[in-house]
Image: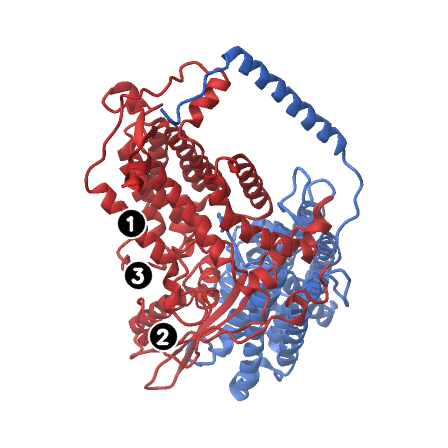
Chain colours: A blue, B red
Amino acid sequence: MANLPDNSRPLPELEKQFQIRAARVAGLALALALGCAPVALPDGERRVALRGATDQVIVPTYQELSVRSAELSALLDELLSSPGSADLEATRQAYLDVRAPLQEAGAFGFGPSAELHSPAVLDQAPVDLAKVDAELASEKELTVAHLRTLGANKRGLHAIEYLLFPADDADLEAALRADDLSGERRRQFASSAAQIVADGAAKLLAGWDDETSGYARRFSEPGAPDSVSKSVQAGLDTLLNEAVVETELIANVKLGMPLGASTGGTVDPSAQESERAEASVTDMLASLRGIRNIYFGSRDGVAEPCLSTLVRAKNASADQHARAALADAEAALLAIPAPFSQALEESPETAQAAYDALKALKRVLATEVLSSLGASLKFSDNDGD
Amino acid sequence: MATDLRFQRPVDVASLAAFRIAFGALLLALSLRYFAHGWIAEYFLKPTHFFTYWGFGWVRAWPGLGMYLHFGLMAACALGVLLGYRYRVSVLGYGLLFGYAHLIDKTNYLNHYYLVVCVCGLMACLPLAGAWSLDARRDARVRVDLVPSWMLWALRAQFGLVYLFGGLAKLNADWLLRAEPLSSWLSRSSDWPLVGELLGARSTAFAMSWAGALFDLAVVPLLLWRKSRPFAFAALVAFHLLTATLFSIGMFPYVMIVGATLFFEADWPRRLASRLAWRGVTQAAPSRNVGAPRWLQPALAVYFLVQLLAPARHWLYPGQLCWSEQGFRFSWNVMLMEKNGAVDFRVVEPATGRTFRVSPSDYFTPYQAAMMATQPDMVLEAARLVAADYRARGLSEPAVYADAFASLNGRPMQRLLDPTVDLAREVDGLTNKTWILPMTTQPSSQVASFSGSFQ
């Protein structure tokens, strides 16, 4: 009968032969393993680009955020202790200076930022102004500990903004400097809120920059036992995907909501995030700058090799399109006349042009740039084939 | 007829039984991976909307813990297949449960998931628990030593079709003349120690593209020829392990490696056991054969006719398959493209002219939105969902337009869909979708053909 085993040779002999062969294969494998001892290898461009984005963009941005937050906190402490002589203009500028690195950091809101819920802790929008007023009017001590117990929509930078801006509001300034309980409580609230922001920024920085457990090393050095990136490519994928998400966020939320993009064109200036400080467009520009910084691996120029280098090496036109789209989006945002609230009412076409430019940027990043790096936009690690 | 006789010839059930055990182990791993990776919540609980298959809109994710129970049952069925315990119920149950889970959302379609369902269906018709199973141990009537060879050939054919159509699909300009998408994918690994530079070289991408196409087309004949079989199998294992290492393709390589064991002589497990001096593995008893219901062979003939025709249906549609994706699924178009897209919707109220900009992220998870952006039928379904939502919000007869852009295999992005077509008025179906724009972009000079950067 066909397909039945050939048992012409005795089993012990077959077994012996099998054992000899197995021993040979094992010996060969051992020799190969010994021959492949680790050797020092130069880092490839991709690894350098990933490390550059981390060390030259992400960590310095969080360092600046931490420093600026501490400066704001110190100035608000000074206002608390010396309300008459404190430099309110400098304090307001310090507030705006915190916002810049914070918005830039939106382009890499993963890792510690997600773990610490930093966007909510530091910059929840909108703030429930009625509840902030209720806290100010209450008899509770407005300590850091108490403010920590409040919801994220009752503290954070926008609550501070509420107390410091508009800059030209004399009544607000008088209330803030007032030598009475009400003024004292305003200053105490601002000081405590700023302290929470500063603490949050310091934690965020430590989360990235800690020498032993820092996310920066674990993210940018795949291969280590505690790495969070499975590979260099996985790290680059994360950066690119976050950039796409951030572009969507600027277009749909920061610009699209006040523009009324999703409400049939009904403009709603109150939907902007930084109306009182008139910093909404500045915020968007900073967010866009965060994306730019990641793409060019630098906060002030271009540091080769970076994502742009890798895209260019694969597809020069894709890199050109990305650069052009970044520049167009920035130009379109800069073209929105100040103040933004007025522009929304009187020249919404400028905001619409910026919205379209941001959407164009998202398209380039989500298609050509991702394709060039073989970084298919994926948020899940399923069994693709 | 001689052919009939050949296919009726009794062969040892051993290779089928070994396949059942190995495939059952893979099915078990496949189910457990969903728990281990958190995919049940990610794919079935987190989304608020799903992309349904045409004709299967009634398939829904179970509420609450239902999907966990669903996958738990799948794992139990897989264990039943592995152990050969209530085998037919187990394998049929797994196929139905797995098929149901993946009919819930087109987002999760994968070729090898479809293959798993097909194989489970075939297995349910065949007596693969005839040997080395709990069923055979507890019930002598289940025990089978010999089966007609067509049973073995049915499973061989199923796996063979994957290679055949997978190979035919690679006979296109992008794959052969531009080495795309392999060039893009391999460059992802250009930082690997020792071999990184090699993987990043375009010559490697070309070599692997051609080798991959040749492999897919030649491996089945080479597995069938006794003299070339050991070499073909070794190449197959190396090929699939290489792809498993280089690309994120999950269980697919292992499914195909296990499937390839079916191409060995039917009694290979007994020979191997004999060589390894395993006791307890007995010889096949020539007297025990198994029949099959009369309807089975004609049913299988119809099934394989469908299997042959379905992958060819894309020829009925105009345009490039990878661009329009009409007739793409259920056709073994494996690893053919690097395609990325971006979609935004415009909802227009005709009476007032008011325009609402809608982002897919308002309705779908990022993964769903990304998968939808490149697949026109999913964009259509999303548009119809948006229209229904805006109708519910009080808009009168809202029109929905899609600004959909995509980039295929390194080409510059271009519009995928006609932005002037009101998708809310379009009906999903098998007819040609005239609102898919033809692909007109050319590859950039850097990625087009052998010139310049060929190393």
Mark 3 and mark 2 on one chain:
yes
Mark 2 and mark 1 on one chain:
yes
Q: Does residue B184 appear to the left or right of B109 in the view shown?
A: right
**B133 over A346 or under it: above or below:** above
**B72 over B62 or under it: above or below:** above
Mark closer to the observer (2, 1): 1
Q: Position of residue B251 (x, y in %)?
A: 48, 42
Q: Does residue B133 appear to the left or right of B180 in the view shown?
A: left
Point 60% across, 55% down: residue: B185
The disc label shown at residue B423, or none: 2
Q: Position of residue A296 (x, y in %)?
A: 72, 65
Question: How far, Cα to Cα, is label 1 from label 3?
Answer: 20 Å
Residue wearing tag 1: B303
Q: Position of residue A10 (x, y in %)?
A: 50, 12
What amino acid type should be assigned to the residue bearing mark 3?
Answer: Trp
Question: How far, Cα to Cα, is label 2 from label 1?
Answer: 35 Å
